[in-house]
Amino acid sequence: MKINEIFKSIQGETSYAGLLCTFLRITGCNLRCSYCDTTYAYEEGTEMPIGSILERVAGFKTKLVCITGGEPLSDKDTPSLIEELLSINYTILVETNGSYDIRMIPQKAIKIMDIKCPDSGASHLMHWQNIRYLTKRDEIKFILRSRDDYEWAKGVIAEYRLSEVAQVLIGTVFNALPPRTVVQWILEDNLPVRFQLQLHKYIWDPQARGV
């Protein structure tokens, strides 16, 4: 597998925010979102056998592992890697962009699935059938860049009754939309979501890698 980076940090997003976590960033992505903050993962990486990846992960001594990218499902071997990690009792979070069929993700893993808003430039590439494959253990993430994105996300949440499907997360593109503004919209609409910040971008330099 081509691996961009493996590191230990705190989880910066999702309902697992603040927990110690090992991140395994897989090289490659099929989308080119307008606000992507990991463009270096499109191509950069080192070929590693799964055994070596497991050794690196074990060295960080955390039980929570986040498999991210790029887009981890762009690598055909990602499901096998997840199975290996699950077999040795890691809790696995899989961050996926919502354009691949998520049924390839092993059931015991926790799916963190994006639904791309219009300002991303990728909302038309979503695999909408994925919603039916989510469970209450999983999470759905919207990243907003504008009021239009918010209104669109609000419509999708209502149309698909997403709050009954999985935990719904709303965040903002860093430095593009004031978090206070979005929180005010959520309060006004009594929207059944969890608001999130990218904690790692407030703790470290927003451009820092490996954190």
Image (cartoon, helix red, strand yellow):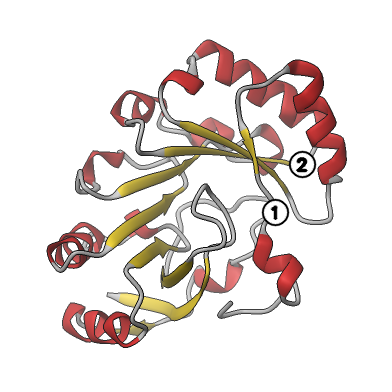
Q: Which residue is mark 2?
A: 145
> Which amino acid is tagged 2?
Arg
Q: Position of residue 112 (x, y in %)?
A: 43, 46
Secondary element at tag 1: loop
Q: Nearer the viewer, residue 26 or 195?
A: 195
Quarter of the image with the C terminus is bottom right
Q: Tell how many labels.
A: 2
Q: Is residue 3 left or right of residue 40?
A: left
Q: Nearer the viewer, residue 37 or 93?
A: 93
Establish if 74 lies above or below 186.
below
Give me the disc on residue 128. none
Determine which quarter of the picture holds residue 91. bottom left
Quarter of the image with the N terminus is bottom left
Q: Position of residue 150 (x, y in %)?
A: 73, 28
> Which amino acid is tagged 1?
Tyr
Establish if 101 lies above or below 30.
above
Q: Nearer the viewer, residue 182 or 118?
A: 182
State the residue at coordinates (35%, 38%).
Answer: 137
Q: Position of residue 58 (x, y in %)?
A: 27, 82
Q: Is residue 62 left or right of residue 150?
A: left
Establish if 3 lies above or below 91.
below
Determine which quarter of the picture holds residue 68. bottom left
Q: Is residue 97 left or right of residue 34?
A: left
Q: Which residue is mark 1?
A: 35
State the residue at coordinates (75%, 66%).
Answer: 202
**Label 2 packing within 10 angstroms: few (<14), some (14-19), many (20+):** many
Q: CA distance from mark 2 to mark 1?
A: 9 Å
For the view shown, which residue lies furthest in the top direction?
Answer: 159
Q: Position of residue 70 (x, y in %)?
A: 48, 62
State the residue at coordinates (43%, 65%).
Answer: 28
**Marks 2 and 1 close (CB-CB < 8 Å):** yes
Q: Is residue 67 left or right of residue 145?
A: left
